[in-house]
Image: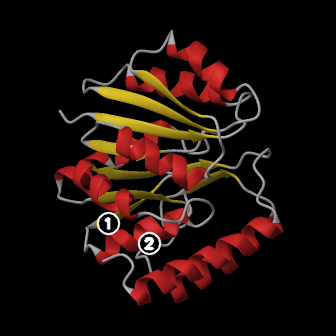
Amino acid sequence: MKKLSVVIPAYNEEHRIGKTLAAVSEFLQKQTYPTEILVVNDGSKDRTAAVVAEYEKKIPNLTLVDNQENHGKGWVTKQGMLKATGDIRLFMDADNSTRVEEVVKMLPFFEQGFDLVVGSRRIAGSDIAVKQPWIRDFLGGVFRLIVHTLVPVGVTDSQCGFKAFSRQAAETIFPKQSIYRWAFDVEILALARRRKYKIKEVPVRWVNDAESHVKFGGMVSMLLEVVQVRLNLWTGKYK
């Protein structure tokens, strides 16, 4: 059976990362295939690294990648996906908004020849257990419309932080990634489409965490980065 790597980017997650690691480890230890967990600390200002280091002593195949400076979620996701050794490499959010168990829906599609399998909160069969505030939902809808207009990525929910890649796809796409903060998901999906990789979107269960916030300034930055991806495609930067 193929090896599964679970990559968790983390920034100031000292209060949530322990619970997430316990849940991920509990699931993975029940599986018959080899696994590993990589937590990539993005220069957290709190005790995130220390908490993970304690769990590293208790959880088999858990590795902490500890960056002293903050680079952005996209940067540490790239670092983790390239450091991982799995045949299938999944990245997920540190707040456990989509539980690792949802990967069970994804694995069969790799056997069918898909290169990327991405979680979606927007297609039939998805389950948003706890909804986010209406304003965030509205702004998210506006963002999706702009993304689909500027950079069609072939999926309905580019921002769901639960995506799995084959080894070959990960090692081809992530070295070319250049967006490291808000819109990195859009860029990696655009890169996958440019390479004509087979992408499958699957419904997942998602729980909004009240502690997670995206401010208006973040939305503006995200849109500017989407424009940058569009320019990169036009100018041939990804060749």
N-terminal label among 2 and 1: 2
Q: Residue at x 50, y 84 (%)?
A: 230
Left or right: 23 in relation to 47: left
At horizontal 17% and vertical 58% (from top left) the residue drawn is 113
Label of residue 130 in the image? none
Q: Do the residues under discs 2 and 1 have CB atoms within 8 angstroms?
A: yes
Observer-nearest of 94 and 137: 94
Query: Residue 98 at x, y = what percent?
Result: 55, 45
Under circle 1, the secondary element is strand
Hey, what amino acid is under mark 1?
Ile
Q: Quadrant of residue 11?
A: top right
Relative side of 79 to 179, left or right: left
Q: Residues within 10 Å of mark 1 (few under 14, many from 20)?
A: many
Q: Is residue 58 left or right of residue 113?
A: right
| Residue underneath mark 2 | 155
Q: Quadrant of residue 93?
A: top right
Q: Which image quarter is the N terminus in?
A: top left
Three-letter code for the amino acid on which mark 2 is drawn: Val
How many marks on residues?
2
Q: Is residue 63 above or below residue 160?
A: above
**Front residue of this view, candidates 115 and 29:** 115
- Res 151 seen here: no
Residue visible at 27% across and 26% down in the picture: 34
- To which residue does mark 1 refer? 199
* Position in image of residue 65 (x %, y %): 50, 31
Residue at the image point whose x is 76% and y is 34% from the top: 45
Label 2 and label 1: CA atoms lie apart by 8 Å
Q: Secondary structure at mark 2?
A: loop
Query: Which quadrant is the C terminus positioned in?
Result: bottom left
Query: In this rendering, does residue 73 appear at all?
Result: yes
Residue 227, horizontal then vertical, whole percent? 58, 83
